[in-house]
Every structure is written in structure tokens, then in C-alpha cells.
């Protein structure tokens, strides 16, 4: 159960606020988002009413700071008419909407409008800030408020923030068309959230790739690090109130309207579609597909009717008015070309439908034709399926709709391919009742299981999970009481085990890896530690390098992340058992990027390959590293290797090799009662996770980590290690004596 208040931020309030004869009237909206949020009152949240912030115009008419309905406390964000025009009509619907729906030629880029977008997001924040509390859960919705999570996070570092995008997130090739500053602001704004949700995994991947290219932030299985926080990015396909649509088919008014429709169409097969007037809905392509159907299958002439309902939307905007004109001209042309005195192929209506009319058309039709060229989800498809309690009817659905990922039993088509559309219509109208039942039954079970209530609950639950993980990953700075605890445990222990990374932990990073040579003081330290402990240097370095750097010290060595072991005074043992046929393939790929990226190079190890780009121009090298990473990840599906994205390196190694495997083996072999494990890189996280619960794990740097403690730099760790073996504190001059 959600503790604290639930706060929603969206462009629109959950109800309409009207002023009639000086009195305020409230009319609650019935949209999908409102239904989803209302579902949270069914045991997910404790507060009686949900607080909802949304836009309201004309502050001179409304002085109230809040409006209350039965379920919501609406907090208006007053935005002037002129600002809202630049914000909502400008950036939101003139830039983000067309671009994110893959219409770059309709996209405009206006600095004044983006400034208005920033100003509007700031107005939302200022309004929220007035009574926001640290234990609130803030759930922000859609593209109008990309910047809001970051604005909140600056002043409320510990507050829970969720963000959900209701439209597609485009591929980077589309997203990159935005001006650089805009892209950066959007990404930084979104990363203020604890969790970022999208409809499909494709949108998740598009976002993560854009994040890497714009901010250089990488992900680890949908988790990304922002400053000292972990952010989860995942897919949460929004759904509908299944029972509402399922039961509505039998409502008295619905039955009445449906009977009237069936009487009017007689023995005709009925195809039905309903959409807002929008270029993303593929209305012109739909007509072309239907025309191809009439041309390709003349047997259906005089036997089928297409009810095409278009809901008015933005028709005051010139491009939308032009679209409406083109739509109606095509309908007139098709009806004129194929129609007869007693038969009009397309019945077109430009109006809104009541809920009862909508359900009646869903349940009276033989096929639903839903063909957007790009749609975040498209709930009409789910509504049609849910309403078909009779298990009859065919769903013809664009593969470009987000809902296609869940409704695979529909007849999926490419909406721009007229032949694909026409053949699907013919197939659907000829489909047997048994096949219709089989397909609908599967889709209905899926939708009823994951309905809109489950969607909202899952999102809230995922937010709670990531917040708990953040707390778990918080690294405590090693000082005071914690430092004394480690020193005491070391002193009283009978057998001590130290597991230490090399580069970045014992030795500072060098542009030339060959120059990362331990100085005399480090050699002395390791020697002294070996007198009192079992010390393992666990490195990604090859065994020849470790021999060169540390071969004169009687210390245990682990090379190439665990591929090779060398006990003190003994020979190297090869731990790699699997086939390495992948090496030549990977090497050829890496060589391409050596050519493409100046001063990058390949380090060939016995059990792996490493592409280094530390010396290369940073921005250019990073872009090339992302390209290489993606190519190698694709190859890893065919060959037995793992890809590691490290600190200005990309390393490929056998799947059974990592520091975690090595650490588990060592701990089991040594059976020590004091274990300390220290490292600085992503590969060292494997060590931290593999270490026992009683082990002292230390991260160099203060990023989120599985380690229990952190120190600010390697010198602080060196100082701690000297404390283990030194009788006098402070004799080793150039190391920081304090841990902080």
C-alpha cells in the first residue's frame, strides 16, 4: 500500500472546470488515464482523494487554488492564453507530437516556443512546490512535462517520482533532429524520475540509445545511473477497464443502438473504424487500402459497408484542415467510382460518439480496421476486443501500433501497404466463426489479465521497488564508526583474505596501460599485507602484464577477470574451458573500429579481447564505442561470449569468466574469517555481489554500488590498507591519513 500522498501531474485536469452564471461546475472526464488513476483507490493508496495538477486557462475567471470532485483534488496550473499557445500548440503539438510520430517534415523548431515550453514546465513546478512533501509519490504523465521530473528532483532529492510517456519514443535517428540543447534538457529532465515508463520495449530501447548518444549515459539491463541515483527504464503497456467494455455490450441503450445499426445495414458485412483527426492515424492510407480491396476483390461489391468515424481534433490548425479536406475528397471519389444507386461503400461521419454508440458499433461490426502509421498504444483495438463478449468479429491492426505487441492474434498489416490491407480485409470477412472465436479468446484473456488497474498497480509497485533498490545501493562513506569496525575485525581475525582490483584501485589509470606500474611504496604495502593475509590481486589485465608489474612479490594473482589463476610461488592455471572460436570474428569487428577511431587499439588476451579508446577524442570515440557495442551484442547471440562496457574500454570474454566467479572460488578455497574486497569499476560489482554477507566490500568513488562502503579515491583505500599493517599512523607521507 502506498504511503503518503499520491500526486498526479498531467497537462489536463481529471475534470472540466466550467464557470456558469458565476458558479463553478465540475464535470469528470472518463478517459483511460483517469480510469487508471482511479483504480489506485482500490487498496493501492491510503489517501481518500488523489491530488491532480493540470493546466487551466483564464486565471481572471478562476481564483481557486483547488477544485474537488468525489475522487480528486484538482490543483490548477494557471497558464496564460499567449504562453499556452506557444507551449501547447507550439512545442507540444508543433514539434514533439509530429517528430515522435515520425513526421519530421511537419516538425518546426522555434526557440521562442521552446522557451515557452520551459516556462510552462516551471509554472507546473512552482505550483506543485507550494505544498509538495518529501513522502509524496509524484506521477508525471506525457510529453507536455518532460522537464518537470528534473525540476522537482533539484529541491526534493528524496521524493519518489514516476514518469510515463503515452506516445511513442522515436528512434535516435529521429530524436537527434531536435536541437542539441533541447535534447539535453529533455533527457536531463526525464532522469529526475526514479522510473521512466513506456508502452513497449521498442520505445525503451530507443530511449536508452538516445540517452547514450545525448548524455553518454549507459544502461545495465534497463538501469541507468544519474549522479548518485539509479533510474529504472521499462515497458508498461497501458490497458483498459476490461469489465467495463465487456459488460457494456449487454447494456440496454447499447443493445437498442446495435439493433438499429444491424437493421440499417441488413445483410451487408460491416467494417468499422474510429479515430481522431490526426496524420498519425493513417486515415488516407486506410482509404487507399479499402479502395485496393474493392478493386482487387470485386466479389464484395454490394456486400460490404465501411463505417468510417473521424472524431474532430485540431481542425483549426491548417495542416489538419487540409487533411480533413483530402480525406473527404478521397471518400467522395471512392464512393463515386464504386458505388451504385442502392449501395454506398463508405459511410463517413465527422463527429464524436457517445460511449453507447461506440460499443454498439464495436459489437455490430464484422471487422474493425485500425491502421495507424504510428501510435503509442491505440486503446481502440483493446476496446474492440474487450467488447466482443460474443467472441465474434475480426481485428485488423497496424503493426505500427503499440498494441500490436500484445494483440498478435489480430490480422497484423503494414498500413502503408495497400495490398496488405486489402488482403487482410478479405481474409477477415471470410474468416470462420471458429477461427474468430479462437483468436478473440486468446486476446481477451490477455487483456482481462493485464487490465488498466493492473497497469497502474504495476507502475506504482515498480517505483517502490526501484526506490528500495536505490536505498540498498546507497554506499556509506567509510569513516568513523564503520572504519573502526573494519580495523577491529581485522585485528581479532584468525585468517584474513584481501581481494583487490588493480587499475583504479591500487594504481591510478594511465592513458598508456603499460605505464600503470606500481611504485616502491605500493610494492612495500602489498608485501607487508601478504605477511599477514592471503592477498589476491584480481584484474582484467593479462597474466604477462601482472607478472611484469607484480611478479617480484609473493602474491596471488588472478588475470583476465578470472580466466587465469596463479597462487604465490606457483605457475599460472588456465580456467577457461569453453571454445573460443569467437575471437577471430570479434577481432575483425574491432579492427574496423580501430581504423574508424584514431588512437584506439586492440589488446589481445588469451581469454579475451579489449578495444581501448582512452587516448581518442572523447566525444567521437564514445559514439564509435556505442556502435561497436551494439554490433558485438548482436554477435553475442551467435557465439559464446559476453560483452563488457568498461571505463573507456569494451571487453569481450568467455561467458563463464568474470570476477564474481573467481571470488566465489577463492572464498570457498580460503575459508577466511575476515574478507575485504575493493574495486572501482563495473566489473568489480561482480566481486561485491559474490562476496559473503560478512565481507567488507569497498567501492572506490561514491557512485551507487553493491558495495557496503565507499572511499572517495584510491589513496583513501591505500591508507586503510596501511592501517592494517602499520604500528604508527601517519608515517606514509603522501597518502591521505583521513578516510573522508
Image (cartoon, rainbow, N blue to C red):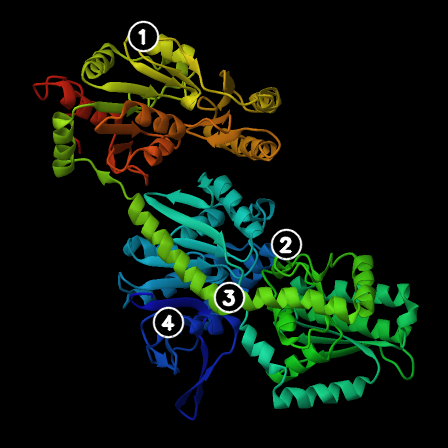
**For the residue carrying disc 1, how many other residues have a C-alpha within 10 Å: few (<14), some (14-19), or many (20+)?**
few
Q: Position of residue 149 (x, y in %)?
A: 38, 56
Label 1, label 2: how many angstroms apart (C-alpha)? 64 Å
Which one is closest to the eye, mark 1 or mark 4?
1
State the residue in front, 219 or 252. Answer: 252
Mark 2 residue element: loop
Q: Are marks 3 and 2 in contact (CB under 8 Å)?
A: no
Q: Which residue is mark 3?
A: 88
Marked residue nearer the N-terminal end (1 or 2) = 2
Marked residue nearer the N-terminal end (1 or 4) = 4
Q: Which residue is mark 2?
A: 102
Label 3, label 1: how many angstroms apart (C-alpha)? 72 Å
Residue drawn 52% across the image and 72% down it: 32
Q: Position of residue 99 (x, y in %)?
A: 59, 55
Which one is closest to the eye, mark 3 or mark 1?
1
Q: Position of residue 606 (x, y in %)?
A: 50, 15
Label 2, label 4: how many angstroms apart (C-alpha)? 40 Å
Q: Which residue is mark 1?
A: 569
Q: Are marks 3 and 4 in contact (CB under 8 Å)?
A: no
Marked residue nearer the N-terminal end (3 or 2) = 3
Mark 1 residue element: loop
Q: Which residue is mark 4?
A: 43
Q: Position of residue 572 (x, y in %)?
A: 40, 11
Marked residue nearer the N-terminal end (3 or 1) = 3
Amino acid at each position: 500500500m502506498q504511503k503518503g500522498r499520491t500526486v498526479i501531474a498531467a497537462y489536463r485536469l481529471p475534470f472540466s472546470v466550467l464557470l456558469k452564471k458565476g458558479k463553478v461546475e465540475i464535470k469528470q472526464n472518463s478517459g483511460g488515464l483517469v480510469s487508471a488513476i482511479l483504480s489506485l483507490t482500490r487498496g493501492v493508496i491510503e489517501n481518500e482523494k488523489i491530488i491532480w495538477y493540470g493546466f487551466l486557462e483564464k486565471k481572471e475567471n478562476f481564483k481557486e487554488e483547488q477544485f474537488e470532485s468525489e475522487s480528486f483534488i484538482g490543483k490548477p496550473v494557471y497558464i496564460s492564453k499567449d504562453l499556452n499557445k506557444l507551449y501547447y500548440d507550439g512545442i507540444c503539438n508543433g514539434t514533439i507530437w509530429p517528430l515522435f510520430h515520425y513526421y519530421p517534415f511537419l516538425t518546426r523548431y522555434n526557440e521562442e516556443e521552446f522557451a515557452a515550453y520551459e516556462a510552462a514546465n516551471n509554472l507546473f513546478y512552482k505550483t506543485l512546490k507550494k505544498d509538495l512533501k518529501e513522502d509524496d509519490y509524484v506521477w508525471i504523465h506525457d510529453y507536455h512535462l518532460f522537464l518537470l521530473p528534473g525540476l522537482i528532483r533539484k529541491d526534493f532529492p528524496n521524493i519518489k517520482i514516476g514518469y510515463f510517456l503515452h506516445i511513442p519514443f522515436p528512434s535516435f535517428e529521429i530524436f537527434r533532429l531536435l536541437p542539441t540543447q533541447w535534447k539535453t534538457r529533455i533527457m536531463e529532465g526525464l532522469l529526475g524520475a526514479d522510473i521512466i515508463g513506456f508502452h513497449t520495449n521498442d520505445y525503451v530501447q530507443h530511449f536508452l540509445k538516445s540517452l547514450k548518444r545525448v548524455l553518454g549515459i549507459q544502461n545495465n539491463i534497463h538501469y541507468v545511473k544519474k549522479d548518485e541515483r539509479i533510474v529504472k527504464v521499462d515497458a508498461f503497456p497501458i490497458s483498459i477497464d476490461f469489465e467495463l467494455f465487456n459488460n457494456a455490450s449487454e447494456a440496454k441503450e447499447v443493445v437498442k443502438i446495435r439493433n438499429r445499426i444491424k437493421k440499417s445495414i441488413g445483410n451487408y458485412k460491416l467494417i468499422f473504424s474510429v479515430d481522431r483527426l490526426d496524420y498519425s492515424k493513417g486515415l488516407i492510407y486506410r482509404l487507399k487500402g479499402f479502395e485496393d480491396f474493392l478493386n482487387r476483390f470485386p466479389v464484395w461489391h454490394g456486400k460490404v459497408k465501411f463505417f468510417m468515424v473521424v472524431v474532430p481534433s485540431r481542425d483549426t490548425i491548417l495542416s489538419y484542415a487540409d487533411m480533413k479536406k483530402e480525406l473527404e475528397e478521397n471518400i467522395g471519389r471512392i464512393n463515386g467510382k464504386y458505388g451504385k444507386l442502392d449501395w454506398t461503400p463508405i459511410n463517413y461521419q465527422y463527429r464524436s460518439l457517445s460511449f453507447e454508440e461506440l460499443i454498439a458499433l464495436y459489437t455490430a461490426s464484422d471487422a474493425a480496421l485500425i491502421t495507424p502509421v504510428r501510435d503509442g498504444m491505440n486503446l481502440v483495438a483493446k476496446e474492440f476486443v474487450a467488447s466482443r463478449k460474443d467472441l465474434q468479429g475480426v481485428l485488423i491492426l497496424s503493426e505500427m501500433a503499440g498494441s500490436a505487441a500484445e494483440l498478435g492474434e489480430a490480422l497484423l498489416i503494414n498500413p502503408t501497404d495497400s495490398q496488405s490491407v486489402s488482403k487482410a480485409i478479405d481474409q477477415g470477412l471470410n474468416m470462420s466463426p471458429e477461427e474468430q472465436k479462437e483468436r478473440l479468446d486468446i486476446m481477451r484473456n490477455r487483456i482481462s489479465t493485464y487490465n488498466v488497474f493492473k497497469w497502474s498497480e504495476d507502475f506504482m509497485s515498480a517505483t517502490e521497488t526501484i526506490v528500495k533498490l536505490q536505498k540498498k545501493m546507497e554506499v556509506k562513506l567509510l569513516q568513523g564508526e564503520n572504519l573502526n569496525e573494519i580495523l577491529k575485525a581485522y585485528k581479532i581475525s584468525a585468517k584474513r583474505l584481501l581481494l583487490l582490483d588493480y587499475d583504479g584501485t591500487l594504481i591510478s589509470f594511465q592513458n598508456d596501460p603499460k605505464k600503470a606500474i606500481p611504485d616502491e611504496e605500493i610494492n612495500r604495502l602489498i608485501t607487508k599485507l601478504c605477511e599477514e593475509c592471503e592477498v589476491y590481486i584480481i584484474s582484467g589485465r593479462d597474466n604477462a602484464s601482472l607478472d611484469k608489474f607484480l611478479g617480484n612479490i609473493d602474491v596471488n594473482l588472478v588475470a583476465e577477470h578470472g580466466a587465469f589463476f596463479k597462487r604465490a610461488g606457483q605457475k599460472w592455471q588456465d580456467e577457461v574451458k569453453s571454445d573460443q572460436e569467437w575471437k577471430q570474428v570479434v577481432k575483425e569487428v574491432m579492427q574496423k573500429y580501430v581504423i574508424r577511431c584514431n588512437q584506439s587499439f586492440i589488446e589481445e588476451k588469451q581469454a579475451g579481447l579489449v578495444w581501448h579508446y582512452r587516448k581518442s577524442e572523447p566525444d567521437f570515440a564514445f559514439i564509435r564505442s556505442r556502435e561497436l557495442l551494439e554490433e558485438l551484442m548482436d554477435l553475442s547471440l551467435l557465439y559464446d561470449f559476453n560483452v563488457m562496457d568498461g571505463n573507456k574500454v569494451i571487453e569481450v570474454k568467455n561467458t563463464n569468466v568474470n570476477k564474481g566467479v573467481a571470488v566465489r572460488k577463492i572464498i570457498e578455497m580460503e575459508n577466511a574469517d575476515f574478507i575485504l574486497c575493493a574495486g572501482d569499476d563495473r566489473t568489480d560489482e561482480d566481486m561485491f555481489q559474490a562476496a559473503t554477507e560478512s565481507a567488507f566490500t569497498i567501492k572506490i568513488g561514491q557512485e551507487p554500488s553493491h558495495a557496503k562502503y565507499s572511499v572517495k579515491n584510491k589513496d583513501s583505500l591505500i591508507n586503510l590498507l596501511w592501517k592494517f599493517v602499520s604500528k604508527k599512523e601517519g608515517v606514509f607521507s603522501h597518502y591521505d591519513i583521513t578516510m573522508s
